[in-house]
Image: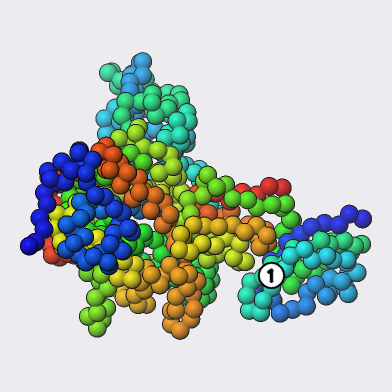
Amino acid sequence: MSIEKTYAEINEKIRSGKAVVLTAEEVISLVEEKGVSEAARQVDVVTTGTFSPMCSSGVFLNFGHSKPRIRMQKVWLNGIPAYTGIAAVDAYLGATELPEDDPCNSNYPGEFRYGGGHVIQDLLARKPVKLEAISYGTDCYPERELETYITLDDINEATLFNPRNAYQNYNCAVNLSNKTIYTYMGLLKPNLGNAHYCSAGQLSPLLNDPYFMTIGIGTRIFLGGGIGYVAWNGTQHFPGIQKDAEGNVYGPAGGTLAVIGDLKQMKPEWLVGTSFLGYGATLTVGIGIPIPILNEEVMRCVSVTDRDLYAPIVDYSEAYGQRIPGNLGYVSYAELKTGKITINGKEVPTAPLSSYPKAREIAGKLKNWIQKGEFLLSEPAQLLPSYRDQIIAKTLDIKGV
Amino acid sequence: MASKKIILHFGKDISDKPIIYHLAKDFGLVFNIIKANVNPNKEGTVVLELTGEQYEQGLEYLESEGVRVQPLAEQISRNEAKCTSCGACTAICPTGALYLERPSMEVMFESDSCVLCQICLKVCPVKAMEVKF
């Protein structure tokens, strides 16, 4: 008999403290031992986690009105500009924004020690943040300039809204050239000197729901140490199944999420200002997503292991920047995690950029919240497009004027 | 004359040259190797205590050979509260002082293996590596 559970049934078990919750790591051995059907019968929820740099992140802020009022035309938080092309005292601070006087890569490789992501972390640490604003002055908003200090608790709203997070899968980055390069995948040494990857693999949220059977608009999640929601698909959401030229299948890739939540209940250890030498500033985001075991197919998906999941190996010295299609092959996360892989006959040391211990901690925290009955699952208002929708990535043509 | 502690960084193109020998023979410098990690065809690092009349000339010789010379900082340490165990430093640290413990995938720092090259200070995305002079 096939197993079918509803969100309501699972939530009832969570409320009564009877739900069986495992992390995506713990469920692997259960499925190996008991099989998918028995595991689906026993387990109600599987928790996932990831803790990685996610550039498409930022926060909407409402500062409250000064006396006299100002229609903020430009604002800076600790010297980092925020976007104010919205209402009078609303702004959006992006994670990768830099000070206007940052030397960037004119002093190559730039260090990018402080950016929007660092301001977000300082706000969460309840540090006072310097707010500067200028305007042109209007009859209703006469003030033209202000400078003050704010804290996260002083302002009306701080809504984290990250347009693209939780990439389903990511490249394994290498450097085929003969000089060191500085990328968003870290420092890549010349002549295949190292290989960097960035995924929680078997713990990663969208690798555990590869066909978007449970994660959708309104899914309640662990976000930055607090509670958040899936708002929409992320930008560049192109879910697909990886295949090589011979048609061999290498698992899912390409899905992304837009997520939202109240920054005020998040924690500075789960939203961390981050700098990539020679590349820029960003924010490392902690995300955990619970997967309700609605049926055996969902259980089969969450039992995926690092041996089944693959990253494409991509040259960042030329192929990536020049958008040259193809790759140098696929490598499993199990192989990547051993610390060395072989590319073009050469042994190459590997390193992650995504913290597996933190991913495990997030999945564990979410499991704990659910077991204690503090966190109920929400049924999505709408599921997200999957590989079946065959969304094709558009590219940008440079057209003549 | 007080001896000075310095760090020499060798590119892999010069890792096979007898550079320390020339410091002693041509410039009469007294050297004491504190740590060394030099291998054929690899970038290498030597931490050295150096003293002698022709100290400055010795340094000029080193630089003319393509050796990067850096004053010795006393200690590199890891701020464990800041480190997220992402692992970004582990394939870059030249001596393996920063490495991943398996299967936990926690980043470990073995300061005895550290040759104070300070590359970790630059590549650590969350600036968890610190130097004390």
Q: Amino acid at mark 1?
A: Asn
- The chain that hosts pointer 1 is B
**Is residue B61 shown left or right of residue A225?**
right
Compare residues A170 and A368 and report the one nearer the observer. Answer: A368
Q: Residue furthest left?
A: A1
Q: Position of residue A298 (x, y in %)?
A: 18, 59
Colouring used for the render: rainbow
Question: To which quarter of the image does residue A124 belong?
Answer: top left
Residue A86 horizontal side relative to residue B55, left or right = left
Asked if A284 appears above or below A31 in the picture, the reply is above
Residue visible at 69% across and 73% down in the picture: B38
Residue at left 84%, top 71%? B23
User: Which residue occupies the extreme top position in the image?
Assistant: A67
Q: Quadrant of residue A202?
A: bottom left
In the image: residue A356, left or right of residue A169: right
Secondary element at tag 1: strand
Nearest the camera: A53 or A116? A53
Residue A284: where, in percent of width, then height? 41, 49
Where's residue B104, x and y in %?
46, 59
Question: The N terminus of chain B lies in which quarter of the figure?
Answer: bottom right
Between A217 and A298, which is closer to the camera in this rendering? A298
Question: Can residue A233 be spotted in the picture?
Answer: no
Q: Indicate the position of residue A258 as horizontal and vertical percent values.
A: 25, 48
Q: Is residue A328 left or right of residue B28?
A: left
Going 18% across and 43% down the picture, which residue do you hit?
A13
Q: Quadrant of residue A376?
A: top left
Label 1 neighbourhood size at 10 Å, few (<14), some (14-19), many (20+)?
Answer: some
**Residue on which disc 1 sits:** B37
The residue sitting at 36% across, 59% down in the picture is A200
Can residue B111 be seen by looking at this rendering? yes
